[in-house]
């Protein structure tokens, strides 16, 4: 596995990975109408690409894109997705470890995300805690997700 910066040419592959993962993995926790609202058949590729500017890393295995993560400089982890074919192989954990090193370098104290029902156990396993359960509207359909936070540990100086 190799983490690298996002390139504009990655946009469609990221979209396909996102949509496929939502429909194949999140289907155990969300209805078909919720999945279709969250990850519809079509996307405005220009808008999708703009959301990535300056804040995304992708993971490759060989030449294949197998995941992507999207975190802003204020600590908002907007998206972290792993290909449905690469689940439970350490890809998400690898991305989180890489993001954590950036968090430390940038001095970010709190990372926050809106985790799906499906992703909640992963985020808990790497130290995030649930702040609140949310009902959010997406294209007119209500979805449940969790506002979660990870806090940088404060190191005490011994005196």
Image (cartoon, rainbow, N blue to C red):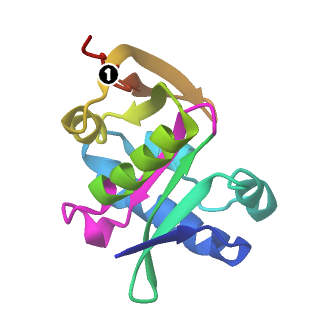
Magenta residues? Answer: 73-92
Q: Determine whether 63 is above or below 27 in the image.
A: below
Q: Position of residue 80 (x, y in %)?
A: 44, 50
Q: Along the line of sight, which residue is nearer the eye, 146 or 97?
A: 97
Describe residue 43's horizontal placement relative to residue 146 as left or right. Answer: right
Mark 1 element type = loop
96 and 81: which one is in front? 96
Q: Residue furthest right?
A: 46
Q: On the rendered image, what quadrant is the C terminus found in?
A: top left
Q: Residue at x 54, y 40 (%)?
A: 78
Q: Is residue 87 magenta?
A: yes
Quarter of the view holding residue 85: bottom left
To which quarter of the image does residue 52 belong?
bottom right
Q: Is residue 88 above or below residue 27?
A: below
Residue 57 vertical position relative to residue 79 in the rendered view, above or below: below
Q: Residue furthest front?
A: 159
Taking the spot 62% from the left edge, 40% from the top edge, the residue there is 72
Q: Is residue 80 above or below residue 146?
A: below
In percent of width and height, residue 74 lies at 62, 31
Residue under circle 1?
155
Residue shown at 32% from the left, 19% from the top: 130
Mark 1 residue crowding within 10 angstroms, few (<14) / some (14–19) / many (20+): few
Left or right of residue 113, residue 48 in this image: right
Q: Is residue 90 magenta?
A: yes
Question: Where does residue 156 sit, x and y in percent of width and height?
Answer: 30, 16
In this view of the protein, which residue sits in the foreground, 91 or 144? 91
Left/right of residue 107 with respect to residue 12 in the rendered view: left
């Amino acid at each position: 596995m190799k983490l690298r910066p996002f390139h504009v040419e990655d946009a469609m592959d990221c979209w396909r990975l996102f949509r496929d993962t939502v429909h194949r993995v999140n289907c155990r926790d969300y209805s078909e109408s919720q999945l279709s609202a969250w990850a519809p058949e079509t996307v405005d590729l220009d808008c999708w690409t703009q959301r990535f500017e300056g804040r995304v890393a992708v993971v490759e295995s060989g030449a294949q894109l197998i995941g992507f993560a999207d975190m802003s400089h204020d600590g908002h982890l907007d998206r972290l997705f792993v290909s449905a074919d690469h689940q439970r192989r350490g890809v998400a954990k690898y991305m989180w470890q890489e993001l954590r090193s950036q968090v430390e370098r940038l001095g970010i104290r709190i990372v926050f995300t809106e985790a799906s029902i499906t992703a909640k156990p992963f985020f808990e396993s790497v130290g995030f805690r649930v702040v609140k359960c949310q009902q959010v509207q997406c294209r007119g359909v209500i979805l449940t997700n969790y506002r979660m936070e990870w806090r940088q540990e404060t190191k005490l100086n011994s005196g």
